[in-house]
Amino acid sequence: MKNILWVLFISLAAYSFYQGSIVAGSAPEHYQLIKAESADSSLGRAMFRAWEKIPYGHGTLLTVVQRNTHTDYFFILTYTLLLLLCSYLQMQNETYLPLNSLLRLNILLALVIASLDITENIKILYNIRHLHDAGLYCSPYIVSTIKWLLSGWAVLIYLISLTRSALFSRRRLA
């Protein structure tokens, strides 16, 4: 199961990266998709309007951004399951109680991170839908910032525990 999730995770990340490179390479301002997560209302509107004016395939670059945001829901599901599974499996091996407790916290954090990412996507789709409505821009900056901080924390805890387990298993073998 874990291997399947890793393959899905890497495949979806590569696909998102590919879509992001299309958007960044085709827009004259080289706006990157990731900037949509942290843009204030003036920059966000400027990015979305620029993407809307550039044809791509059967639509515009804004269509690519919208597709990428919809694809991100599958990515959210994949990384959430991966973080839940990896943290749970590592928790079974972690003998140091404080790290074991933090791995348990990772299980909760995975759900919080997924909720924040879903909220961020909803805000981005809302902004695309209301691009031409004056005053209707909802910046996902705060939600995105919290999501990235919690994600970094969760991955760091997992990696610290994994490293600690690897170091102690080598000492026992020696």
Image: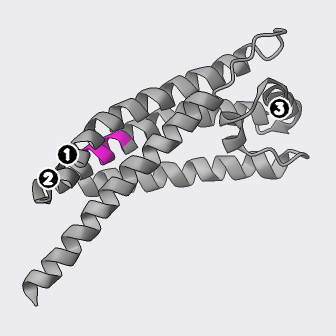
Residue 46: which disc?
none
Residue, x 29% and y 43% (percent of image)? Answer: 106
Q: Quick check: 58 above or below 78?
A: above
**For residue 10, what is the image quadrant?**
bottom left
- What amino acid is labelled 1 in the image? Ser
Q: Which residues fall within the magenta stretch? A: 80-85
Q: Are marks 2 and 1 in contact (CB under 8 Å)?
A: yes
The reply to whether the magenta stretch includes residue 81 is yes
Residue 72 is situated, as x and y percent measured from the top left of the image, at 52, 36
In the displayed structure image, the side of residue 53 where residue 160 appears, left or right? left
Residue at the outermost front position: 98
> Tag 2: Cα neighbours inside 10 Å, few (<14), some, or many (≥20)?
few
Q: Quick check: 95 above or below 170?
A: above
Residue 37 is situated, as x and y percent measured from the top left of the image, at 65, 35
**Eye-nearest disc, 3 or 1:** 1
Q: Which residue is mark 1?
A: 101
Residue, x 80% and y 44% (percent of image)? Answer: 31
- What amino acid is labelled 2 in the image? Leu
Q: Earlier in the sequence, mark 3 or mark 2?
A: 3
Q: CA distance from mark 2 to mark 1?
A: 6 Å
Secondary structure mostly seen in the magenta stretch = helix
The residue nearer to you, when weighing 60 against 41, is: 41
Q: Which residue is mark 2?
A: 97
